[in-house]
Image (cartoon, grey):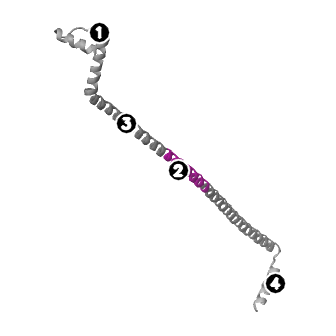
Amino acid sequence: MVTLFYLATEETAGGFGISSDILGSNVINLVIIIGLLVVYGGKFLGNLLTERRNRIAEEIQEAENRASVAAKALAQGKENLNQAQVKAKQIKSDAESSAEKLREEILVQGQKDIERMKATAVQELDSERAKVVAGLKQRIAVLALEKAEQQLKETLTDEVQGKLISRAVEQLGG
């Protein structure tokens, strides 16, 4: 109280002046400044803090949304990877199955070709054997005829020839 009285007396004595009570005047100045801040700055400071809190909450919400979106994208990516791996295994299995089936078909076709070639070779050999046998028979027949003709020429005389003709005529009905 003394300080307020002291300030008031100095003010009436001739205006503002320097107070020699530094401690007392600072407390009063601080009370006045704090009072002005509370009255006028409270609303302003409250609005600033509210805006800052709202901005921080929005940024946290955005970060949570981005984290949620990233987690969903990661889960989707993992699922896509799993599906791709399953599809790759299926493709590999199908390819192996197709390769095995194709190998079996090639082996069967090769076996058929071998059998066909064997049959063709047997037929060709039989055909060639038949040609050779026919050629040999013809050659033997020709040689036999030549030999018979030669023997007939050597052993067939006019007298034997006459007897043969007579016998043939008698057999024919004569």
Question: Which disc number belongs to residue 87?
Answer: 2
Give the quarter of the image for residue 98.
bottom right
Which of labels 4 and 3 is toward the front?
3
Label 1 and label 3: CA atoms lie apart by 48 Å
Kind of element beneath mark 1: loop
Query: Circles 3 and 2: CB distance less than 8 Å?
Result: no
What residue occupies the far bottom of the structure in this picture?
Answer: 174
> Amino acid under label 4?
Lys
Question: Which disc number belongs to residue 163?
Answer: 4
Q: Which residue is mark 1?
A: 21
Which of labels 1 and 3 is toward the front?
1
x and y percent of residue 105 in the render?
61, 58
Question: Which disc number belongs to residue 108?
Answer: none
The stretch of residues the image draws in magenta is 78-101
Label 1 and label 4: CA atoms lie apart by 192 Å
Kind of element beneath mark 3: helix
